[in-house]
Image (cartoon, rainbow, N blue to C red):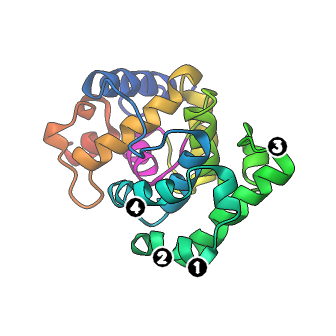
Amino acid sequence: MKKAKDGLTDKKRAELAIDALKKEYPEGICSLIADEPFQLLVATRLSAQCTDARVNMITPALFAKYPTIEDFANADVADVEQLIHSCGFFRQKAKDIVGMANMILSEYGGKVPDTIEELTKLPGVGRKTANLIIGDVYKKPAVVADTHLIRISNRLGLVSVKDPYKVEMKLKEILDPAESNDFCHRCVLHGRAVCAARKPRCEKCVMKDFCLYYFEQNS
């Protein structure tokens, strides 16, 4: 495997990143709050162009009114719109959520699918959401290519592209499958706390010793 200017291979850099973030954020967990698979699917759909904190403010009332997938399937889309209004793009999200519930009941016996291929057939579900579900719910290796992961992976030098699909495929090649899902969650935490988009706090970063961005900024 090709080495970078600092002499590290992609796999070695990935190993160092996994270890550093694991020490910094021992609990590599999703910040969305949900009690069962369909709730997590709903919360993840709501999180598009919206913060997880905002979603977690919305979902308690939503899940209280619609506690089961059958309740969501029978929901009035306009009522769902009202409950999720503050998360943005609420009309499309409400339509997708009710549509997902109906499709899962009619085609999957009420069980949230466990493959990316089947999950991405659901209304409003892309690969990012699908990877989150198979990783968090079904404990399969997954790479959730959200904005934090894409930004941090590029800065570290693990990838050199911004396209989510290409980032996902590249990281699946170099990350330890057993660590990939938690690594993605930890990148979200690190992106919020340290590696911000506009002004990264590199002096506080636990990965600066092997980060190409830091190396380039200080060489």
Q: Which label number is shown at residue 109?
A: 3
Decide: marks 1, 2 in contact (CB < 8 A)? Answer: yes
Q: Which mark is residue 78?
A: 1
Determine which of the numbered discs, if any, sits on residue 82 in the image. Answer: 2
Residue toward you, 59 or 171: 59
Instruction: Name the N-terminal-most of marks 4 and 1.
Output: 4
Q: Quadrant of the C terminus?
A: top left
What is the span of residues highlighted in magenta in the rendered image? 144-158
- Where is residue 204? Give x, y as percent: 15, 38
Q: CA distance from mark 4 to mark 3?
A: 27 Å
| Type of the residue with mark 3 | Gly
Q: Is residue 148 magenta?
A: yes
Judge left or right: residue 184 versus residue 109.
left
Position of 37 with respect to 194 (left or right) is: right
Q: Earlier in the sequence, mark 4 or mark 3?
A: 4
Assign the magenta stretch its main secondary structure.
Answer: helix
Q: CA distance from mark 1 to mark 2?
A: 6 Å
